[in-house]
Amino acid sequence: MDHLPVREHRRPSQPVILALVTAGLMFHSHLALALDGEPGDVAWGFMAMNLLGGLALFLYGMDKMADALKAVAGDSMRWILATLTTNRFMGLITGAVVTSIIQSSSVTTVMLVGFVTAGLLSLSQAIGVILGADIGTTITAQIVAFKVTRYALILVSVGFLLIFISRAERMRQYGALVMGLGLIFFGMGVMSESMRPLRDYQPFIELMQNTTNPLFGILLATLFTALVQSSSATMGVVIALALQGLINLDMGIALALGANIGTCATAGLAAIGKPQEALRVAVAHVTFKIAGVLLIFPFIPELAEFVRAISPQAEAGVSEVDRLAAETPRQIANAHTIFNVGIALLFLPAAGLFARFCEWLVPDRPLEEDIIIRPRYLDEELLDTPSLALGRAQLEASDIGEQVEAMLEKVMPALLSRDRIALREVRRLDERVDVLHAATISYLGKLSKGNLTETQTRKFARLMEAVNNLESIGDIIETELVGLGMKLIDEDVVISPETRKVITNIHEAVSRSVHIAIEAVAQGDETAALTVIDAKDEVNGLTDSAALHESRRLVAEEPNRIAAYTIEMDIIEKLKRIYYFAKRMAKTVTEQSTQEATD
């Protein structure tokens, strides 16, 4: 296929990776120099440089690990979400598992929007998954709370070695996962060490001692998280502070609560300009977070005491700062998890009420607004996760298929009855097909610029072919068949009842093949695809019989007989061509199955 991009086997950019690691080592060396000064002196420039550099390494590691996890497990994530959310409790567990794997609650939320829009999930079921996704995000804080920064470069080295020497795509992804985890720990170490001078900086110590109002911490973390669009980044900085004993547990809990609220900004921005279902999911997300924080706010001291009781304790005889450094990181991570688990268990039984509240708050658009044609499922936030983006493109292709089927169903009655208004309505339907086709092709084009596995590339090719074939069928209906219907009216040609029956039989066979071909592409069903291909004999038999019928009627004593014969044969030819495109769609499914069997 000439329009498909040629994919090359690419290795990661080794200079970039080495530069990142080298930069981190330079940060450490600069920091060591800065720490050689007098006690109480703070080299603010070095500290800021190391803090920001460590945060960059931390986020880069998160991104590498998340990308690798998506590549390794992403193909099954859509299936898991679609099939394991039969009730609220299962939805909660599924949301937690999926989000902990792909390390992105926003990606989980985007997938949910597509499922709710497609009618695969109710909003009530989606709410359970949202609550689970909030639990899944706490795994990041739990990971970074482990004090394994001294082993970070071992993980980076092992991961890089796997990427460098492996030829297998899956093994390289595992290498990226290990290296990403190492960069997370390494970035944490850089951030933590960058703030060590503050342990002896009296003005900062006094500031933290005097800042006892948790509301300040909540507002500060909310603002920071909204700006950086990552609650993981906020929790990374919070735990880096805790590793140096610079904050107590109460302030750490307040900052974690602020991070929970701030992350709602991501969901809110993602919902702008999206269908009402997306807005409802975002409203549910924001409502849970804010309501949960308001409920727990008066009980922060009690939560802190509970967390201290269940978390590891430092050895006796250490200083207050060393005790905080030893205990607080794990305590903050535990409080973060307990908060999200708590609001999930609290709100899960009321998921139905929350769903109705969100539907009341975000009602359906008036019918006149639906005139605007836009894709329902395509979301650019998923382009970094090819397996999920392909799933959304497949949903959009199915939507195009439904529009084409509607056109095919309506065009023949309108044509045979010479209904000009109905023919114009079919033509209007093609406008939607054209818009959705253009949007889907553009989306797939952007997706093709990423790193696709061989399986994903084949699915990409099948979808591209299917969407183009559907658009071709729509064009035949809109341009050719509608045009022939208008010609019947303009030339005052009437098709006889016998010929109507012949054409209707062909139309039904072709329509059936188009329907099965669309299902075969949507589900990757080789059996259905073979049914379409095997229908060739039936369609050819019907068209041959129709041609014989037409030749016999050519001498019939009827007005406009020659004009009728020409139009009728054109109708039969166009229907046969529609079947040709349906067969092409089906062949992409069988060809893919053959390729997968030989891999």
Image: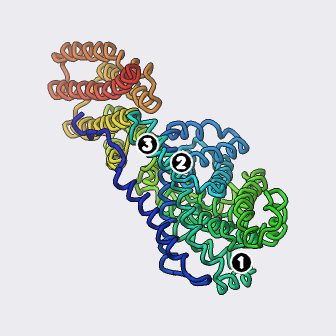
Residue 1 location (% of width, % of height): 24, 33
Camera-nearest label, 3 or 2:
3
Name the residue carrying label 1.
215
Q: In which quarter of the image is residue 575?
A: top left
Q: Which of 599 and 518 is in front in this view?
A: 599
Badge 3, how many Cα within 10 Å: few under 14, some, many 20+?
A: some
Name the residue carrying label 2.
111
Q: Which of 62 and 569 is in front in this view?
A: 62
Element assignment for label 2: helix
Name the residue carrying label 3.
161
Q: Which is nearer the N-term, disc 1 or disc 3?
A: 3
Q: Which is nearer the N-term, disc 3 or disc 2?
A: 2
Marks 1/2: CA distance?
33 Å
Q: Nearer the viewer, residue 335 or 91?
A: 335
Position above or below: 266 against 578:
below
Position above or below: 442 against 339:
above
Type of the residue with mark 1? Leu
